[in-house]
Image (tube, rainbow, N blue to C red):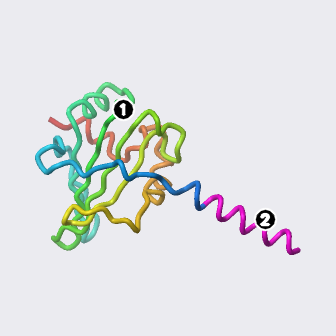
Amino acid sequence: MRFQIFATLGLCLTAQIASAQDNSSIQLPPEGARGEQYTTVTRGGITEHIFTSDEAIAAARDGEPFPNGTVITMDDYRDGALHRILVMEKRGEWEGGTAGAWRFREFAPDGSPNLSENGGRCASCHAGRAADDYVFTRDRMSGAN
């Protein structure tokens, strides 16, 4: 019985460590360098403005995977005020993670990193979108200018 408890505890700790991401290299793009705002998603009191590069939009239109280096930025507004900024970035060296080659980082409205979030929660949600290269709004990029 004692071995079983320690084995279960060990598995839980291992899973927790595995879900943590080193996302410290993900930076918040400057306001003018976020690319095109290709969609806005509204759910109740939440409004999300989502931005990416012309190259990512072209890949979505062509049905291709997003190129390495793709950055998607989401400004998350709650009841009209900026609540947080989320950034997802794709790099080949990250391939094989929960959400393929994507990693995630959260920033406060002032642009400082939210160190209490490691991106694991974002990755687990995006994991179910493998057919869309892990991006929920890929289809909306096809209609972007």
- As measured in the structure, the alpha-carbon distance from the residue carrying label 1 to the one carrying label 2 is 38 Å
> Which numbered disc flags the more N-terminal residue, 1 or 2?
2
Q: Nearer the viewer, residue 47 or 18?
A: 18
For residue 68, the mark is: 1
For residue 2, the mark is: none
Q: Amino acid at mark 2?
A: Ala
Residue linked to disc 2:
7
Residue 142 position, x and y percent, is 26, 34
User: Which residue is found at the position 24% from the left and 30% from the top?
Assistant: 55
Depicted 145 relative to depicted 45: above or below:
above
Q: Nearer the viewer, residue 87 or 21?
A: 21
Residue 14 in magenta? yes
- The N terminus sits in image quarter: bottom right
User: Which residue is found at the position 48% from the left and 57% from the top?
Assistant: 120
Q: Nearer the viewer, residue 118 or 65?
A: 118
Q: Residues within 10 Å of mark 2 (few under 14, many from 20)?
A: few
Depicted 49 relative to depicted 82: above or below:
above
